[in-house]
Image (cartoon, helix red, strand yellow):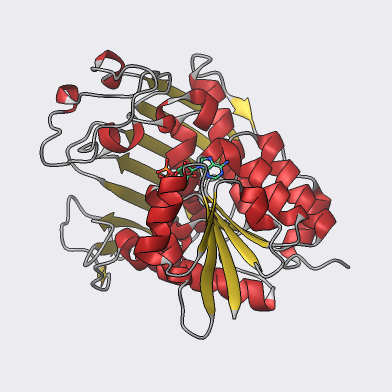
Amino acid sequence: MIQVGVVGAGFRSRLATAAEVPGTSRVVAVADVDEQAARRAVAERHPGADTYTDHRALLDRADVDAVLLITPDHTHADLACAALQAGKAVFVEKPLATTVEDCDRVLRVARETGSRLYVGHNMRHMPLVRTMREIIERGDIGTVQSVWVRHFVGNGGDFYFKDWHAERRYTTSLLLQKAAHDIDVVHWLAGAYTERVSAFGALRVYGDGHRRAPGTPKAPDWLDPERHWPPRAQRDLNAVIDVEDLSLVNLQLGGGVLAAYQQCHFTPDYWRSYTVIGDMGRLENFGDGSGAVVKVWNRRRSGYAADADAEHVLPPSTEVHAGADTPLMAEFLRFVRDGGRTDTSPVAARMSVAAGVQATASLRAAGEPQDIAPLDPQLVDYFERGQRSL
Ligand SMILES: NC(=O)c1ccc[n+]([C@@H]2O[C@H](COP(=O)([O-])OP(=O)(O)OC[C@H]3O[C@@H](n4cnc5c(N)ncnc54)[C@H](O)[C@@H]3O)[C@@H](O)[C@H]2O)c1
């Protein structure tokens, strides 16, 4: 039985229900600086678990084998290092950290301590992403040359402009906060990491919106996709907003693959559109959740053809993230028990943060291209061996 501690009992902490697996794992402790949040999580999802307001009390418990870090992005690096040093297996939510230096610090501490590190890039377990990867691995579109991602963040005003997400000091940028997912997927699909980026971005809509007074809590109806429309009708935004709500990034990957990522926080719809172009065809998804379709054109040239040469329909799912979170947690628990390689990768997590950080630097420097510093090859080796020392 793996005994799990959860640090951070906010919106995303529902993920921890996937660690309540009879006979395999259970949550025995929840820590949150907000005592009410920890108590609520225990009452709703983890009966019998103890609550703490200081993560150190949770880490001091010898009977906690693994911890889930589900706190705001800027806290990830310090909490991950503390948990690794306490000898716990660590699940840290994406993004791994908000700076490249912090990512590298976490990876170094993982290697020095030998404690297991797992980064929760759940998109690698999304049926859409796995379907696209299978199509590519099978050779249906040839060798990948380009990946284009359009990210329509329909609930942007609700989710990202009413709390810490809206502040650079907690996220670096929303570009990094959200694109950490998609840049990782681009890297996974293309089989290469970003080496150089150039970006433009702006705060086009929410900069002018109605803001709450500093220190006042979010309104009880902060998340209401039906009523909070159009975006300029939003009220009670965060007191400080210094991140962009629109960003366009060009990425040059190893091996010459070129990618583009576009993120908008004021669209009416909320989904991701991927186009992957190989040297023998292309794929594109229509919808990204339950029942979505990935179409492949690869037999001939034509004008616009709604009928593709192949269509791959995703399985139905009623879970958030189209069912990615259950296999994500199952993989983490398997990794805690047995170690070894996983579909998610701490090295890849670092490389997606590095690309997001440098894209942010570029967009705040009028699009000036920025290079991505490679990771220490010794750390790459350690993680590619499945976190086993020689
Ligand atoms: N993988 C995904 O699909 C996905 C989805 C949503 C959020 N996330 C990630 O999950 C993390 C949490 O996001 P959220 O939406 O739940 O945020 P949130 O603000 O709703 O919750 C964060 C919680 O952490 C607590 N906290 C802050 N600092 C703490 C500390 N030092 N020790 C203990 N508790 C602390 C806060 O009091 C709060 O209850 C973020 O890193 C976010 O990027 C990932």
**46 left or right of 74?**
left
Residue 62, placed above or below residue 192: below
**90 left or right of 174?**
right
Query: In front here: 168 or 162?
Result: 162
For the point 34% across and 67% down, which residue is it?
323
**Residue farthest along the right direction in this orientation:** 390
Q: Is residue 128 visible?
A: no
Query: In front here: 40 or 168?
Result: 40
| Residue 130: percent from left, percent from top | 42, 67
Residue 264, placed above or below residue 26: above
Q: Picture quarter containing residue 229?
A: top left
Q: Picture quarter containing residue 64?
A: bottom right
**10 left or right of 320?**
right
For the point 32% across and 38% down, which residue is it?
159
| Residue 241: percent from left, percent from top | 39, 20
For the point 39% across and 28% down, which residue is it?
247
How many discs mark residues in the rendered view?
Answer: 0
| Residue 262: percent from left, percent from top | 37, 35
Residue 311, placed above or below residue 262: below
Quarter in which the N terminus is drawn: bottom right
Quarter in which the C terminus is drawn: bottom right
Residue 316, placed above or below residue 29: below
